[in-house]
Amino acid sequence: MKPVQTALQKWMRENENFKETYARVKQEVVNDPEIKEFLSLHPELTQKEIDKNLIKLYEYKSQTKQCTACKSFDSCVNMLQGYSPILHVENNEIHLSYEKCHSRLDYEKQKKQQKLIQSLYMPKEIMEATIADIDSNPERSNAVRELLSFVERAKNGVPQKGIYFYGPFGVGKTYFLGALANKLKEFNVSSTLIYMPEFVREIKASMKDDSFNDKVEFFKKADVLMLDDIGAEMQSAWFRDEILGSILQYRMMERLPVFFTSNYSLDQLEKHLATTRGGVELVKAGRIIERMKQVCKEVEIKGENRRN
């Protein structure tokens, strides 16, 4: 690395005891076990070449290799955080390069996985949910089985159908979605979590800033779409038919799964969706429910209210 080598050269030039320091550093370098081994593997290297690249050899010596002196990526002691030095010979010349260490690779993997979950208005608790922390009491065992079944099938590709989790307030329906999203990222499957009342407001607001089409397309094409608390929002016939209906139609045709949570069963939700300011529209609401049945499976979650 040129900046590192330039700094070392500058230090050596400015040091009053240059010759003495140079001799000591050279002795330390050539006696270093790793460098001695490297030089023994390359007998073709001349003394002139070794002397010319003393700074490179010193730089190599001063760096930790493959996390031997680091407990984590954040505690890396190397000049280039998360990079480990490598010495190699090309055309009888010594070269020094760097490669990512194990800690940096793990760090980058985690950062990439974090980006696989996109959410609108989801609390931190949900974003950090894990399947292991789901309480699998008898009342929730069926919902847990369905969740684990989806995860198992997702290892070989995203299944075509999601799950419609419904049940009373506070039984952990949203937590199921967060736990699933975190599990799916291990398979590099992205999830988009949306709190429905805020989603409705987001779409309406986007009509004022020309982002409407982009946002609808984004929700249509998400790998796994999760709509939390459907039925809680004050929904217009326009949103039901033009937005929700359009998204579900696309995902149904493309065989992309959708997950929902709701306090309503699908039959109850149909009645809720049918009631608008313009009257009761059972046919249009029924059309939405039929599309939902194509992209998800209805599963009840029972249990006590955990928010109390």
Image: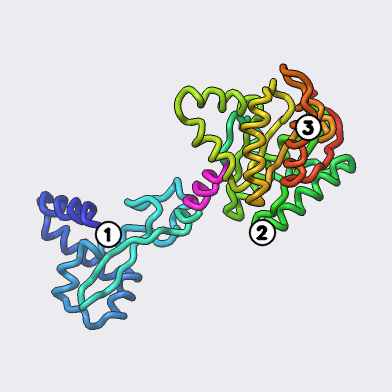
Front-lying residue, 198 or 278: 278
229 vs 75, left or right, is right
Q: Is residue 115 magenta?
A: yes
Which x, y percent locates residue 191? 60, 44
The mark lying in front, picked from 2 and 1, is 2
Quadrant position of the C terminus in the picture: top right
Q: Nearer the viewer, residue 78 or 170?
A: 170
Q: Which mark is residue 155?
A: 2
Question: Do labels 2 and 1 touch, CB within 8 Å?
Answer: no
Q: Could you tell me which residue is drawn at 60 percent across and 40 percent down?
A: 192
For the stretch drawn in magenta, what is the main secondary structure?
helix
According to the picture, the residue beneath numbered tag 3 turns out to be 283
Q: CA distance from mark 2 to mark 1?
A: 44 Å
Question: What SS does tag 3 mark?
Answer: helix
Q: Quadrant of residue 62?
A: bottom left
Residues shaded magenta: 107-117
Residue reaching furthest top?
A: 277
Q: Amino acid at mark 2?
A: Lys
> Which numbered disc covers residue 59?
1
- Residue 304 placement, left or right of 253: right
Q: Earlier in the sequence, mark 3 or mark 1?
A: 1
Decide which of tag 3 and tag 2 comes sooner along the chain: 2
Residue at x-position 57% and y-position 53%: 188
Badge nearest the viewer, 3 or 2: 3
